[in-house]
Image (spheres, rainbow, N blue to C red):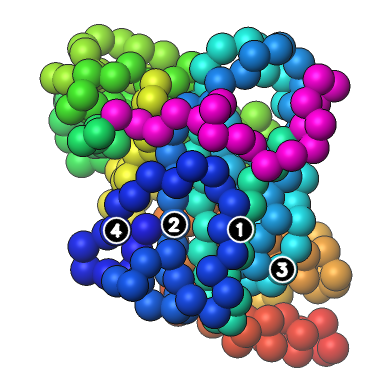
Amino acid sequence: MSNPTTPVTKTDATVDSDWGSGSPDPAITADNFFVRWTGALDVATAGDYTFTAVADGGVRLWIDGNLVLDRWEEGSAASNSQPIPLAAGSHAITMEYFDGAGNAEVQLRWSSSTVPDTVIPTNVLTPPPAGAHAPVLAWTGEADYTADSIHPQDGTTATVFTYRVKYIDADGNLPATGSPRVHILDQGVEIAGSPFGMTLVSGTPTAGAIYTYPALLPVGVDYTHVFDAVDATGLRAVGAPSLDGRTPVVAGDGPNVQDAPMAGDIDRSGRVDGFDLGKLAISYGSQPGGLHWNDLSDLQNNGVIDGTDLDLLVDAFLQ
């Protein structure tokens, strides 16, 4: 939990809290705070499970490293995941919540053919071991990867771009199944199939294990990427390598790709319309490096997508 200089750490029996106009702890101010829960979820019976977050504030939920709920915005609402097939046994679970202003409330529920809709109970939740460390992601430092995490830097649609990242876990915990992953984005939007699970090359979690993913990229001009990881106990990586301003470039197939689009034409359709508004809404509030960042939505080119960009889009729409 944060916003103090030193984060507050505690164990909750369930994710079922109504702080009203307050906060989870006296050290945390009543507004603009962030909470992350991590641990393991014990599934007794295999099946399709639906997760529901009821929150006054933004929520995100990962199961086994897969983002299954993403309503990272202000407001009071209930958000449902798609039915998720889970095998019997332990599954890594991470939930994040932020409160902007006003009341703060959050609850996590689940249901299946064998479990009625209910708050996920204490007896199926296990916190990480005391003193556990979250994994860390870093550049590998290998030849061709000393400055960032991709080689080569440009090419054509026949070029194999290789992404590599070093996974480090001080507790020696292996990553959860399908982790670490690389998210590959074109114009700030994840390409088809992204995020992609990576394959172990060498090493151990304690000393640093190198993972890789090769990709053929569709035509584009400014691909970016970011990594994430979850360890076997449910702890998420707290950071990922940046691209140091460099992006892989794939040769375009004509002026409709290579030419700069008109201001406001976020989806490159040749006109400014409601679809562009939808693209801006998805990336609203994001900054460079965020999973929802979209360079073309930053109409004022100041590194944040906000109300000014929305005003500019509306002006372009009315022209």
Q: Residues within 10 Å of mark 1 (few under 14, many from 20)?
A: many
Which label was assigned to residue 106? Answer: 1
Task: Please name which of the two marks, 2 or 4, marks the residue nearer to the observer.
Answer: 4
Secondary structure state at the residue bearing disc 3: strand
Q: Which residue is mark 4?
A: 8
Secondary structure state at the residue bearing disc 1: strand
- Rounded to the nearest whole Å, what is the CA distance between mark 2 and mark 4? 9 Å
Secondary structure state at the residue bearing disc 4: loop
Kind of residue at disc 1? Val
Q: Which residue is mark 3?
A: 76
Q: Quadrant of the N terminus?
A: bottom left
Give the residues in magenta. 111-129
Q: Earlier in the sequence, mark 3 or mark 4?
A: 4
Please report the residue visible at 81 percent of the width from the left and 73 percent of the height from the top: 272
Q: Could you tell me if the residues under marks 2 and 1 are in contact, i.e. CB atoms within 8 Å?
A: yes
Kind of residue at disc 2? Val
